[in-house]
Image: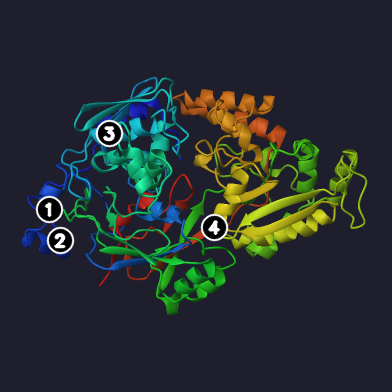
């Protein structure tokens, strides 16, 4: 992904999506029937004056069909966000090379990257037919920046100083106190749609500035506060189907743990058309079946019950059975380029509440010893069918930010050196089971909770138990539900956390969670990360000098509009990460894959895969269709 230059941002003002000048637009037969019955306005009245024309990957599609997919458990919002809910103000293009108009018809930034002006589409409507205007954008920003708002919101904005102004019904200006040269990229990334998720005419009932009874409304719905109600209903979650949307499909059933099928139907007011003037989406409905585990999803895949997905099941371990099932299941495999830089990143808690553990975990030699005790090549052979190479928590070799020393240091399997390092720390005494004793005379036991969503983490951890026992360190690993593992580390109760290595390509600047204490995902220094986000916030703790230096560099990076300067500053951040060795990596992930129904058209043959690039969203899923 290319960083956005100031000139590119300013020049985007003149870039408008191509227009369809046909006298008549076309629509899905089911909508045409409603128009004929007088229950729905004509399509030309439902579309904005200048709808976005989506150039299809293969060609013009056909209306009809149900996209069958699956969710794991009751909190798999991420897959809905990737498939249905990626309609940000500005978006990434398919190849992840630039930011392009989407809900915004055009956009520009001033030379200092402190003022950002967006022009939306005149006549754009929410899924219930209500007008979508700049007032909705201002409402979303003002609500999230409200002094009493105490729920989740994106961390890339200074909510205490951001200002939003409606210039007219279709133009909004966002003003920042400090330059933010990465704002456009962040608005196009996974957390960007926050600004277009809150229809004022519906969501204002939860906000005290607009409804004096907001607290009571929240309580009646089972929430502790108005901000919690706003977060759950008007931010990103899909617990209720009430909220109007700008997405291609609107929610019909609640994702609340009760409904086993979460249904989405065509949004009759969706703002995109194909080059022939056919209103999108082509597919009528999306049905997500709620499952209990990955095995259930895999079984649905090989039985041909999943039409387009790589969620949860698309692992190296499962690939042989998925590959062999293509003919029977009526699907084919396409490719993803994994932007993740690691199959598993291991983070010791350097901010541990236990002083003895904190002192031990903060000792770099202890972390280096654990790293040298890992037989990465065996993990690659056993877990990933020999695909991948040993790699630390560092940008990928294909990245412009690749730091070879950071990527390769301490990856040699050398248990003798690991033992030597631990002996050098004075950890020479052992119990009867061969486990080393800490400075307090207690056996050194590291607790690790791995998310049950990902069987790889459990299997890798079982190998770590053996490797580290050989050098006198006990690992107590348990496989638990993801939400429990996250709750554990976000309350700073964890010894260690394991997760995927996001931030491997161009997303490294947007998601540097493993390179410095950056956000709530930086489990190696959660309290330091809290300080970075808000020094006065609950749980914030003054970071080390090295971490503070990284944070200062990142603040400079954010205020720069130059890609060259951003790259230079990020390189310095990585140099410090190399010296500090915050987290331990295992290996580079192999190439990924997607299952696609053989009848499905406009499927990309290759697409990037990353958290910040929420695949498949940027391809424009509204263009998918079933070939008759």
Q: How far apart, in angstroms, are the residues tagged by discs 3 and 1?
A: 33 Å
Q: Residues within 10 Å of mark 2 (few under 14, many from 20)?
A: some
Query: In the image, which disc is placed on residue 507?
Result: none
* Quarter in which the C terminus is drawn: bottom left
Query: In the image, which disc is placed on residue 591?
Result: 4
Ranked by sequence position, the earlier of labels 4 and 3 is 3
Q: Nearer the viewer, residue 260 or 284?
A: 260
Q: Above or below — where is 605 with respect to 546? A: below
Label 1: element kind: helix
Q: How far apart, in angstroms, are the residues tagged by discs 4 and 1?
A: 42 Å
Task: Answer left or right for 615 relative to 514.
Answer: left
Label 2: element kind: helix
Q: Which circle, 3 or 1, is nearer the viewer?
A: 3
Q: Which residue is mark 2?
A: 31
Q: Which residue is mark 1?
A: 43
Q: In x, y percent, where is residue 472?
A: 86, 52
Q: Nearer the viewer, residue 531 or 602?
A: 531
Q: In x, y percent, where is residue 409?
A: 73, 42
Task: Answer left or right for 426 relative to 44.
Answer: right
The color scheme shown is rainbow
Q: Is residue 516 visible?
A: no
Snapshot quadrant of residue 602 = bottom left
Q: Are marks 1 and 2 in contact (CB under 8 Å)?
A: yes
Ranked by sequence position, the earlier of labels 1 and 2 is 2
Label 4: element kind: loop
């Amino acid at each position: 992904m290319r960083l956005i230059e100031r000139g590119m941002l300013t020049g985007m003002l003149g870039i408008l999506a191509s227009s369809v000048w046909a006298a008549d637009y076309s629509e899905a037969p089911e909508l045409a029937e409603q128009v004929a019955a007088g229950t729905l306005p004509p399509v030309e009245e439902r579309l904005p004056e200048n709808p976005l024309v989506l150039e299809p990957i293969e060609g013009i599609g056909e209306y009809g069909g149900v996209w069958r997919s699956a969710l794991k458990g009751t909190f798999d919002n991420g897959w809905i966000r990737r498939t249905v809910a990626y309609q940000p103000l500005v978006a990434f293009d398919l190849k992840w090379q630039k930011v392009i108009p989407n809900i915004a018809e055009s956009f520009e930034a001033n030379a200092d990257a402190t003022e950002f002006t967006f022009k939306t589409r005149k006549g754009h409507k929410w899924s219930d037919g209500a007008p979508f205007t700049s007032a909705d954008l201002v409402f979303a920003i003002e609500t999230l920046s409200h002094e009493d708002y105490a729920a989740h919101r994106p961390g890339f904005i200074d909510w205490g100083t951001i200002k939003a102004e409606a210039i007219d019904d279709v133009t909004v200006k966002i003003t920042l106190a400090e330059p933010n040269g990465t704002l456009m990229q962040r608005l196009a990334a996974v957390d960007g749609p926050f600004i277009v998720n809150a229809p004022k005419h519906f969501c204002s009932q939860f906000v005290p500035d607009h409804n004096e009874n907001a607290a009571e409304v929240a309580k009646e719905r089972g929430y502790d506060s108005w901000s919690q109600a706003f977060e759950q209903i008007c931010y990103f979650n899909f617990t209720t189907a009430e909220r109007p949307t700008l997405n291609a499909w609107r929610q019909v059933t609640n994702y609340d743990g009760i409904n086993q099928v979460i249904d989405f139907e065509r949004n009759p007011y969706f703002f995109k058309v194909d080059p022939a003037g056919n209103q999108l989406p082509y597919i009528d409905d999306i049905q997500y079946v709620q499952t209990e585990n990955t095995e259930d999803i895999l079984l649905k895949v090989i039985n041909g019950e999943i039409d387009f997905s790589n969620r949860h099941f698309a692992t190296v371990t499962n690939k042989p059975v998925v590959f062999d099932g293509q003919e029977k299941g009526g699907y084919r495999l396409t490719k993803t380029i994994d932007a993740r830089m690691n199959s598993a990143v291991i983070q010791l808690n350097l901010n541990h509440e236990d002083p003895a553990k904190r002192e031990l975990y903060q000792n770099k030699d202890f972390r280096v010893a654990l790293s040298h005790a890992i037989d990465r090549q065996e993990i690659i052979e056993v877990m990933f069918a020999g695909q991948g190479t040993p790699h630390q928590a560092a940008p990928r070799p294909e990245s412009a930010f690749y730091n070879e020393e950071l990527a390769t240091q301490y990856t040699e399997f050398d248990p003798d050196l690991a033992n030597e390092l631990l002996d050098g720390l004075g950890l020479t005494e052992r119990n009867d089971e061969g486990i080393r004793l800490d400075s307090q005379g207690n056996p050194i036991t590291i607790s690790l909770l791995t998310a049950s969503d990902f069987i790889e983490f459990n299997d890798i951890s079982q190998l770590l138990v053996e490797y580290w026992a050989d050098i006198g360190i006990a690992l107590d690993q348990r496989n638990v539900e993801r939400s429990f593992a996250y709750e554990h580390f976000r309350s700073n109760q964890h010894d260690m956390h394991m997760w995927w290595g996001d931030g491997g390509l161009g997303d490294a600047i947007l998601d540097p969670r493993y390179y410095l204490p950056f956000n709530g995902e930086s489990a190696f220094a959660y309290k330091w990360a809290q300080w970075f986000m808000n020094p006065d916030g609950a749980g914030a703790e003054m970071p080390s000098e090295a971490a503070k230096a990284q944070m200062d560099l990142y603040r400079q990076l954010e205020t720069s509009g130059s890609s060259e300067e951003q790259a230079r500053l990020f390189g310095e951040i990585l140099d410090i990460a190399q010296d500090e060795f915050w987290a331990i990596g295992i290996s580079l992930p192999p190439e990924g894959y997607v299952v696609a129904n053989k009848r499905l058209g406009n499927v990309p043959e290759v697409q990037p895969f990353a958290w910040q690039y929420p695949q498949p969203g940027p391809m424009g899923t509204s263009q998918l269709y079933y070939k008759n």
